[in-house]
Image (cartoon, rainbow, N blue to C red):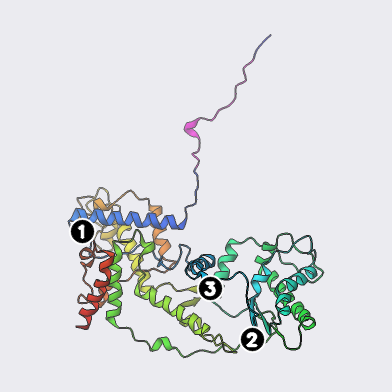
Amino acid sequence: MVFLDIIRPEKIATFSTKTHSISKVKRELKDQRTENSLLRKQIAWSKEQNTPISDLQQFISLPRAIVDHDGLPYKGDKSKTLGIYHSRYPEAFENKLHFKPDCVIIDGMFILNSKPLKSSNRLFAHFLVSLFNRWIIPYIQLNTKEIHIVFDDQSPQLSPKDIERKRRDEKAETSAKILISETTKIPSDWQAFLHNRENKKQLVQLVSEKFLHFAKIALNSVQSFVIGGGFENASKQTLKRLPQTCRQIFLKRNHIAWISKIREALYSRVPSEEFYLPSFDALFLHWKRSYWVSRVWIQAYCENVQYPSLTDFGWKLEIDGQLDVIWDSPENLQKVINNIKLWTAGCNCLKSDCNSKICGCKKINMACGPGCKCGSSCKNKNVNSQVCNTEETEENTAEAVASTQVLYNSESDGSDFGDDTMDGSVFFELQNVDDDDLENIIFNFQYQQLA
């Protein structure tokens, strides 16, 4: 008997291609890494030169106190807000009404999110009857004089709600568009069906038409039934421009300096830029958006609501017609880009003395800065920035700079208003300030300005 060994070919590790694992990093984590890296460079440069940091720079382009890392406004949690009110005013909450209401206003979208029971709702016709019996009939039996159902307009004019709709569309799983009628079968995945805006639009119109038909039969002579936002062919409210009241507001220089002073006083007390007070420009734009909302809601009692122009109140229209938020001014954006370039961009002269055109900084007639990698023999700068050069890859540097070219920043430079309004050393004067002393700081600053 002969035994044969099977020789299997093996790959030699020396010539094998090294596999590269690609992992996605969240934008929030990228911002934290960029901020920490640049702050370390600032500290190293300050220590080497024995010079205090007088300019408090910002490295994240968004005012993170009012916007998330994706550039979308923070979304309030209605359930948490309800819980706060319930704990503070428990006597105002009742599980059941102890009186007969003369008028009720029902959120139509809340009704549509009631998931149909498959056992009793096989078709949309069955579902519509069950909705009317559940939400409308009880108030008819109580002899409620006015019953209102309000739907969100599914084909509205330009609205800030478009930003929230965009957020939902990116996260939600939607189903394909289907043509629905009373004889259409109820889809198996109800939420995916509603996430498709065309499906929701058809459902709103179908519910509105059938509810009006049911109400004509069920209501008595003294009752009325009103549906708002449920008909595409209904008369639209005319769009008019309100007087630009905001433009009549004059901003004084000391107000801007006051906000800048507070920002710098709080700089050392926040763990990251996520909790940093936004710049004056960012706060002013945020106030304009809030003012737009207040101007709309103050007309809630009016028959025809007049909408101010969104582009005059802190929003902008993109080329594709999408609405976006202006988080800060272009000037502040450029400051953040310059801040990042200062500590990341520079020459790579590791061995030369930067005294020839080979040096990238010398070639463009600029002195070497903290972001350069040149050594102690550099003759093209007044200070030595070697200690500022932590081990950073060029990919991270390019990524940090590129990220600021798309978003809006939240950096405000108080030096624009002169040395008499902003003291560069305020950071060190107020570095150990207590929370209780903040009110005194504000008062003393206002007193000095008035004096």
Q: Earlier in the sequence, mark 1 or mark 2?
A: 2
State the image coordinates of residue 372 (x, y, percent, origin top left). 28, 55
Residue position marked by numbered label 2 in the rendering: 236
Q: Nearer the viewer, residue 160 or 435?
A: 435
Labelled disc at residue 381? 1
Tell me the magenta residue range: 4-19
Q: Kindly check if marks 3 and 2 are in contact, taking CB atoms under 8 A apart as contact.
A: no
Query: Dot 2: what SS?
Result: loop
State the image coordinates of residue 375 (x, y, percent, origin top left). 23, 50
Q: Earlier in the sequence, mark 3 or mark 2?
A: 3
Image side of residue 122 versus residue 175, left or right? right
Q: Residues within 10 Å of mark 1 (few under 14, many from 20)?
A: some
Q: Nearer the viewer, residue 109 or 277?
A: 109
Residue position marked by numbered label 3 in the rendering: 92
State the image coordinates of residue 81 (x, y, percent, origin top left). 50, 68
Q: CA distance from mark 3 to mark 2?
A: 37 Å
Query: Dot 3: what SS?
Result: helix
Q: Earlier in the sequence, mark 3 or mark 1?
A: 3
Residue 329 visible in image: no
Q: Kindly check if marks 1 and 2 are in contact, taking CB atoms under 8 A apart as contact.
A: no
Disc nearest the viewer among 1 and 2? 2
Position of the N terminus, as image quadrant, is top right
Q: Compared with residue 352, is residue 115 higher up or lower down, i.e. above or below?
A: below
Residue type at the position of mark 2: Lys
